[in-house]
Amino acid sequence: QVQLVESGGGLVQSGGSLRLSCTASGRFFTINAMGWYRQAPGKQRELVATITRSGSTNYADTAKGRFTISRDNAKNTVYLQMNSLNSEDTAVYYCNANVVVRYIGEDVYWGQGTQVTVSS
């Protein structure tokens, strides 16, 4: 079974920074794309950023210039560095990963989410 565990969320003042981490564990062959999504109260879950295994990145317009996604394939970990945070960034942040499990194939797995709250 594959598990994704996020960490690094918390309370931060407007203009501050946070770094989220998400580590995959379990029995699997490889991890392809990984990403971060977020869901604010009363809103749908939305894309923040994604990164391929080779390091190609994609960002939502709201994240461009402020957030940086990166990964460490040896540690099965994806990171999200968030700078210049504002109240609109307040949300539960979820990581996901396209994981290839031997003899099963590729599937998408989600973490449990980590709360990010930005105070003004």
Image (tube, helix red, strand yellow):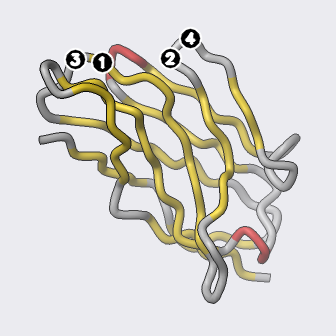
Residue shown at 50% from the left, 17% from the top: 53
Residue 73 marker: none
Q: Position of residue 101 (x, y in %)?
A: 20, 26
Residue 53 marker: 2
In the displayed image of the protein, which residue is found farthest to the front?
104
Residue 29 marker: 3
Q: Provide the residue designation for mark 1.
A: 30
Quadrant of residue 113 in the image?
A: bottom left
Residue shown at 74% from the left, 44% from the top: 67
Mark 3 lies on a secondary structure that is loop
Q: Provide the residue designation for mark 4.
A: 54
Which amino acid is tagged 4? Ser
Mark 4 lies on a secondary structure that is loop
Q: Position of residue 65 (x, y in %)?
A: 87, 41
Badge 2 vs badge 1, beta-carbon distance below 8 Å: yes
Separation of residues labelled 2 and 1 (CA atoms)? 9 Å
Separation of residues labelled 3 and 4 (CA atoms)? 16 Å
- Mark 1 or 4, nearer chain start: 1
Badge 4 vs badge 2, beta-carbon distance below 8 Å: yes
In the depicted view, which residue is nearer to us: 115 or 42?
A: 42
Quadrant of residue 29 in the image?
A: top left
- Mark 2 or 3, nearer chain start: 3
Mark 2 lies on a secondary structure that is loop
Position of the C terminus, as image quadrant, is: bottom right
